[in-house]
Structure formats: C-alpha cells, structure tokens
Amino acid sequence: MLLGMSLEAFTLLHVVISIAGIASGALVTVGMLNGNRMNTWTATFLATTILTSATGYLFPFQKVLPSHIVGAISLAILAVAVVARYPCDLAGSWRTTYVVTAMIAFYLNVFVLVVQAFLKVPALRALAPTGTEGPFKVAQLIVLCLFAILTTLAVRRF
C-alpha cells in the first residue's frame, strides 16, 4: 500500500498527475510563445510536474532505474525553474533560464509519455518491443526536435 492506497490506485493517481502536467505544460508553452506569463497555468504546470517526478519514487523498486534518473534530473531542473519564476521573478537572464528549464521539464514529461506509450500500447510495442528499435528512436528524435524548436521560439518570444 502506497500512502494508504493500492498499487493500482496509486498508479492511476500518478498517471492523472502526469497527464495534468503535460496538459498544463502545453498551455504554458503556448503562453510563452505568445509572451503571456499564464500565472495560474504556470503554477499548475510546475506543481504537477514536480509531483509527477516525486511520486515516481514512491513505487516499489529494488534498484535505481532509468526512470529514477530522469526523475532526479527533472526535479533538479524544476528547482531552477521555480527559483527563476518566483523569487527571481523572471528578471534579466532569469527569464531565459526559466523558459529553458521549464521546457526541458516539459520535454522530459513527454519523453516519458513516449516511453510509456511504446510499453503499454500494443501496436507501438509491436513496433519496438525492447525500446531500442528504429520506430522508438525516430519517435523520440521527433519529440526532441520539436522541443528544440519550441524552446528556441519561446526564448525569443517570452
């Protein structure tokens, strides 16, 4: 039992938080591309993305997994994003720091979404059963390129 929940209920909670982080990240990205701070959505994005990474550590495990490493990287990046956004109030170079770190955190959420899609969706799993095959690599490369473009645009426009 995790936090008094069954593993299934906790997994569902983790997935819902993750989806909320991705959805709010998409809205915040649109806001940055339009020069809009989107204060409420930004707080939602940062909180749900932090919770996504943090709750990932509450699942039972025997050894450190790639997901734990991605979670640690995400939490470190999010700490910088929070400082840039709130105590530093996007002043000077903190604006660029915020945009880049927020976009990296959003990218990591989408990266994990793609990993999970290839693990859980039968049609995708058939294309890349071990996660090392071409279709998986191409999907991740497309996501990476998309985020590189979005981050560049967001830095220029926000």
Image: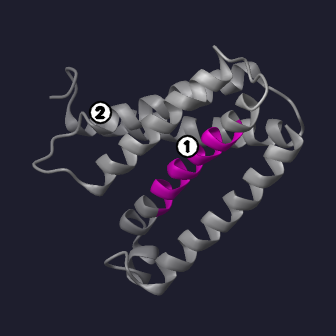
Q: Where is residue 130 in the image (x, y as percent from the top left)?
A: 31, 77
Decide whether the magenta segment is chiefly helix, strand or loop: helix
**Front position in the image: 78 or 142:** 78
Does the magenta portion include 104?
Answer: yes
**Label 1 crowd bin: few (<14), some (14–19), many (20+), radius 10 Å:** many
**Front position in the image: 90 or 113:** 90
Q: What residue type is labelled 2?
A: Phe
The answer to which image quadrant residue 59 occupies is top left
Q: At 30% across and 56% down in the image, what residue appears? A: 66
Which dot marks residue 105?
Answer: 1
* Disc 1 element: helix
Q: Where is residue 74 in the image (x, y as percent from the top left)?
A: 46, 41
Q: Position of residue 122 (x, y in %)?
A: 40, 72
Q: At 33% across and 79% down in the image, what residue appears? A: 129
Quadrant where the N terminus is found in the figure: top left
Residue 67 seen in render: yes
The answer to which image quadrant residue 98 occupies is top right
Which dot marks residue 10?
Answer: 2
Residue 16 seen in render: no
